[in-house]
Image (spheres, rainbow, N blue to C red):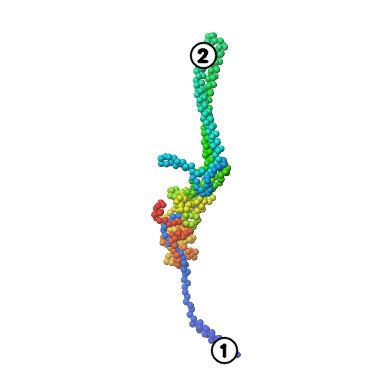
Amino acid sequence: MLISIVLSVLVLSAGGVSSGYLAGLRQPPPVREPEPRRYNVEVFTVESANVQEIVTAFGTAQANREVTVAAQVAGELVEVHPELKVGVQVHPPTVTTSGTGEITQAPGDELAKIDPRTYAERVTQIQNRLVEARTELERLTQEEKNLDRLLERWTADYQDQLQEFAKAEELYKQKIYTDSDFRRAQLELRQYEKNLLQNRNEKDLFPVRRRQAEQQIDTLQNDLKLAELDEQRTVVRPPFTGRLSRVFVERGQYVKPGDALVTLTDASVVEVPLPVTQEDYAKLLPAVRARRFPMVELAENETAPGRWQGRLVRVSPKADEQSRTVTVYVQVENALQSTPLLPGTFVHARIDGPVLHEVLVIPREAVLNSRGFVCRDNHAQLREVVVSQTLQTLAVIREGFAAGDQIILTNLDVLYDGAPVTPQATRTLAEELQQRATRVARLVTAAAVDGAN
């Protein structure tokens, strides 16, 4: 047992010595310095360009001319247009003059006809009363002439009677005439004076009676015009060429003044009111005042390609109190469109705004907290950036970047000044504008800028 214990101790000691020897033979591992992380980034090439702003807005197209035709007189509809249906085109009365001066009238289409018998009878009644009034005026004229002749005779008789009275007065003074003879002469003279005065008074009334008759004739003539107008209004015709968009009546229906008959729409010219911000209004106003009328592209929605072309023709003189927007108006001539723009269509408008000359425009995401990075020799170089204005997803740079710079668009939250980077893709302004779902600007050539000015 003692020998076993001694042998075990010797074996363990030999193992420990061998392990220490082997450990002394092991070399320490080499130390390697850590390499900095390299970032894969996308870059954007900055270039100086002429960029035209595009002002966007939404609106609903409406017909430039639309009217609801209403009845102006009461009565039963005895006739209606043979095709009084929505979509049918109708024409108004027209008057044309040929080169020789010959005038040709076209009656136009008859939308409806109200029973005219009552109104025709009223016209006849007034015409008859007018004939009576004119006859009465002629009678007064003749009566006045007769009275003039009678007045001349009475005046002559009165002068004769004055002479007779003067003789009777002289004889009375000479005591040849008695008191009764003299009073009889006085009474006869007074009777002649009374008759003469009565005829003169009647003569003085004739101008008044004539004016009354003339006024009655004027009143009847006005009544006749109104009656004839009401008779004409029994036939309802369209005020302009258009298509029926709504029909409210049928034959046999009784209508009153003001009752709607049809709605007529002229869609040859369509207008689109668009609410824009006051900032955009300020951009568009100078062109409208200079009568340059900016072009407008219209589409069904924000991302769809343009389908219709129009022009901005006028602006509202006041802002909306609630939305703080100003309404501008776009006019579209459907004759110039491949597909007509129908009233009631909701459209997205892209209005040509002012041109920014030789500016640096970059994606807004390239600037974070007024800072950006430029890729130089595969390293990120930090820049302080000043943005003069934004065009939705784009930014116009005043300071910080220059034309030709390769600015970094991605990993901006982890980059630092001097960070190693590897450009993976390069984008340009033309590609950026093309890829944007919403058009906010477009590149224009120097020739286009000169033409716009």
Q: Which mark is residue 212?
A: none
Q: Residue 117: where, in percent of width, then height?
A: 55, 38
Using a 10 Å C-alpha cutoff, classify the residue at mark 2 as few (fewer than 14 neighbours), some (14 to 19) or many (20 or more).
some
Q: Residue 352: where, in percent of width, then height?
A: 45, 53
Q: Amino acid at mark 1?
A: Leu
Give me the C-alpha separation between circle 1 and circle 2. 205 Å
- Judged from this view, the residue extending furthest toward the right is 1
- Mark 2 = which residue? 164
- Residue 180 showing in the rendered view: yes
Q: Nearer the viewer, residue 403 or 262?
A: 262
Q: Residue 161: where, in percent of width, then height?
A: 52, 15
Is 274 placed above or below 436 here? above
For the image shown, how many numbered marks are present on the structure? 2
- Residue 401 showing in the rendered view: no
Of the image marks 1 and 2, the number of the one nearer the N terminus: 1
Q: Nearer the viewer, residue 291 or 398?
A: 291
- Mark 1 = which residue? 7
Question: At x 55% / y 12%, what residue is drawn?
Answer: 182
Determine the secondary structure under disc 1: helix
Using a 10 Å C-alpha cutoff, classify the residue at mark 1 as few (fewer than 14 neighbours), some (14 to 19) or many (20 or more).
few
Q: Amino acid at mark 2?
A: Glu
Relative horizontal placement of residue 182, taking residue 44 as reference (left or right):
right
Q: Residue 254: where, in percent of width, then height?
A: 58, 42
Question: At x 49% / y 64%, what residue is drawn?
Answer: 413
Residues tagged 1 and 2 counted as in contact (Cβ below 8 A): no
Q: Nearer the viewer, mark 1 or mark 2?
A: 2
Determine the secondary structure under disc 2: helix
From the image, which quarter does the N terminus lie in? Answer: bottom right
Is 244 placed above or below 131 here? below
Q: Nearer the viewer, residue 264 or 175?
A: 264
Is 36 placed above or below 18 here? above
Question: At x 53% / y 49%, what residue is drawn?
Answer: 86
